[in-house]
Amino acid sequence: MRQLLVTVFGLFCSIHSVFAQGSDTDFMRSMGKMYVVVAVIGAIFLGLVVFLIALDRRLTKLENQIKEHE
């Protein structure tokens, strides 16, 4: 779990550094769309993380059931 948090933090830092550079960033900030893009990317990433955690829990339960029946 700690590795996951470190990875997520590193990803957000790298995304921030990518969006903080360039003239396109200033244009998107002036139009107010920059924050929408970041919010959408964050929501997609958060959804994927939640899905993977739920999937891992389900697989762990199934593995435990298989071990009990053997």
Image: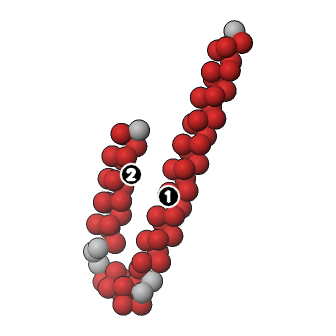
Q: Position of residue 39 (x, y in %)?
A: 47, 71
Q: Which color scheme does this rendered protein use?
A: secondary structure
Q: Amino acid at mark 2?
A: Val
Secondary structure under tag 1 reads helix
Q: Is residue 43 above or below residue 28?
A: above
Q: Is residue 49 above or below residue 12?
A: above
Q: Residue at x 61, y 40 (%)?
A: 55
- Quadrant location, the C terminus: top right
Q: Residue beneath label 1, please?
A: 45
Q: Residue at x 51, y 50 (%)?
A: 49
Instruction: Judge the density around disc 2: few (<14), some (14-19), many (≥20) Cα neighbours within 10 Å.
Output: some
In the orientation shown, which residue stands out farthest toward the bottom? 31
- Quadrant location, the N terminus: top left
Horizontal arrangement in the rendering, residue 10 relative to residue 59 (left or right): left
Q: Amino acid at mark 1?
A: Phe
Counting residues from the start of the chain, the first of labels 1 and 2 encountered is 2
Q: Position of residue 31 (x, y in %)?
A: 42, 90
Q: Residue at x 62, y 31 (%)?
A: 59
Horizontal arrangement in the rendering, residue 60 relative to residue 38 (left or right): right
Tag count? 2
Quick check: marks 1 and 2 in contact, CB under 8 Å?
Answer: yes
Q: Residue at x 68, y 18 (%)?
A: 66
In the image, 26 versus 70, the foreground residue is 70
Q: Quadrant of residue 26?
A: bottom left
Instruction: Judge the density around disc 1: few (<14), some (14-19), many (≥20) Cα neighbours within 10 Å.
Output: some
Marker disc for residue 8:
2
In the orientation shown, which residue stands out farthest toward the top? 70
In the image, 40 versus 54, the foreground residue is 54
Q: Position of residue 37 (x, y in %)?
A: 47, 75
